[in-house]
Image: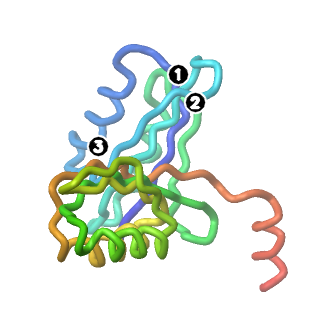
Amino acid sequence: MNHTISALVENKFGVLARVAGMFSGRGFNIETLNVGPMYGGKYSRITVTVKDGRNSVDQCVKQLSKLVNVIEVEDFEDSGKFVARELVMIKIKCDSSNRTELLEIAGLFRGKVIDVDKTSLIIECTGNPNKIKAFFGMVAPYGIIEMARTGNVALKRGKAAELFDEGKE
């Protein structure tokens, strides 16, 4: 089972190393790791995705919240309680004979062409991990030259989503 864990931390030297070290020290392989400063630069948000075959992420989250410079930690294990997106930039082989097909595929996935060359296209695509996987499946036959992928960024849904969920019970 994948767990997406979001930590609000102070934007200070060594915090990321302590967070990553805490996961690796407990035997977790970090599937994705994303970190970026918040508005104003005083804080950063770290989003980590780990696979949990041993059901011990809860203890890991508790220990993470006790680390110095960690403000808040959330484990988004219930997919209805949060939204997650990732970004991929992918350079694909193309020529004049298949450029139109690739542009149509980019359009289907709401991708954006950010570079065009005689022999390649670079397409930017954002979405949930399933959308990104489907996008890869469509463009892989054309030949992937190189790619960069961010991994998940995630935020808890707003209060309206919680009220809707309560009304279902």
Residue annotated with mark 1: 10
Work out which quarter of the rendered image holds the C terminus and state it.
bottom right
Q: Amino acid at mark 3?
A: Phe
Residue annotated with mark 2: 71
N-terminal of the pair, mark 2 or mark 3, is 3
User: How many angstroms separate mark 2 from mark 3 (CA)?
Assistant: 17 Å
Which residue is at a point 77% across and 67% down the rendered structure image?
162
Which of the 4 quarters of the picture holds residue 91?
bottom left
Q: Secondary structure at mark 3?
A: helix
In the displayed orientation, state which residue is furthest to the top. 13
From the viewer's perspective, is 27 left or right of 111?
left
Work out which quarter of the rendered image holds the N terminus and state it.
bottom left
In the displayed orientation, state which residue is furthest to the front. 96
| Numbered label attached to residue 23 | 3
The x and y percentages for residue 21 are 26, 34
Q: Secondary structure at mark 2?
A: strand
Q: Amino acid at mark 2?
A: Ile
Instruction: Tell me if residue 168 comes above or below residue 108 in the rendering.
Output: below
Q: Are marks 3 and 1 in contact (CB under 8 Å)?
A: no
User: How many angstroms separate mark 1 from mark 2 (CA)?
Assistant: 7 Å
Instruction: Tell me if residue 82 comes above or below residue 40 in the rendering.
Output: below
The x and y percentages for residue 69 are 49, 22
